[in-house]
Image (cartoon, grey):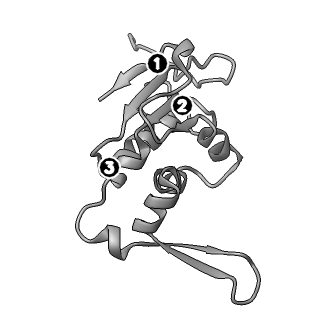
Amino acid sequence: MNTLSYKTVSAKKETVERKWFVVDAEGETVGRLSTKIAAILMGKTKPSFTPHVDTGDYVIVTNAGKVRFTGNKVDQKYYLSYSLYPGGQKSVIAKDLLNSKPTKVLEKAVKGMLPKTKLGNAMFKKLFLYEGSEHPHAAQKPETLK
């Protein structure tokens, strides 16, 4: 009986190799961009993906304030927050949030796509958002992601 035996290799946090990627968000739609960023942060683009280990890479997003929404979402979409006090619900329209805190739009979109656990929080810390086209991570030699 000649059978090949393959062994599934489970990644460990000590053996994970991380890369740095730069994404230019100018003119990109929020949802499509954030799904790609979330997949990279989780490590789903790697063959060594393991659900219980943070195998993701670092992502630097430049021009985060120049993202766009499709349709009428920029006027109709609103973000809710709640202070846990009675009557403490606040809402902000997407256009106002883009004007006041441009990086928050992508931040909220990506965070919503990551796991709601300690592992998800660790993945989110590998995301760096910048309004302009400059970033201070040149020493990491990041690759440009299309």
What is the x, y in percent for residue 108?
52, 56
Rendered view: 125 above or below 108: above
Quarter of the image where the C terminus is located = top left
The mark nearer the N terminus, 2 or 1, is 2
Mark 3–mark 1 Cα distance, whole angstroms, equals 21 Å
Mark 3–mark 2 Cα distance, whole angstroms, equals 18 Å
Q: Position of 27 compared to 129: left or right?
A: left
Rendered view: 7 above or below 106: above
Disc 1: CA contacts within 10 A as few (<14), some (14-19) or many (>=20): some
Q: Residue 56: which numbered mark, if any?
A: 2
Q: Which residue is mark 1?
A: 142
Rendered view: 35 above or below 19: below
Examine the image and state in which quarter residue 9 appears.
top right
Secondary element under disc 1, as helix, strand or loop, is loop
Examine the image and state in which quarter residue 45 appears.
top left
Q: In this rendering, which labeled residue sits more in front, label 2 or label 1? A: 1
What is the x, y in percent for residue 69?
30, 60
What amino acid type should be assigned to the residue bearing mark 3?
Arg
- Check whether the beta carbons of the residues at disc 3 and disc 1 lie within 8 A of each other: no
What amino acid type should be assigned to the residue bearing mark 2?
Gly
The mark nearer the N terminus, 3 or 1, is 3
Q: Residue at left 50%, top 19%?
A: 19
Disc 2: CA contacts within 10 A as few (<14), some (14-19) or many (>=20): many
Secondary element under disc 3, as helix, strand or loop, is helix
Q: Which residue is mark 3?
A: 32
What is the x, y in percent for residue 133?
41, 32
Q: Residue at left 33%, top 67%?
A: 74
Mark 2–mark 1 Cα distance, whole angstroms, equals 14 Å
- Check whether the beta carbons of the residues at disc 3 and disc 2 lie within 8 A of each other: no
What is the x, y in percent for residue 71?
22, 67
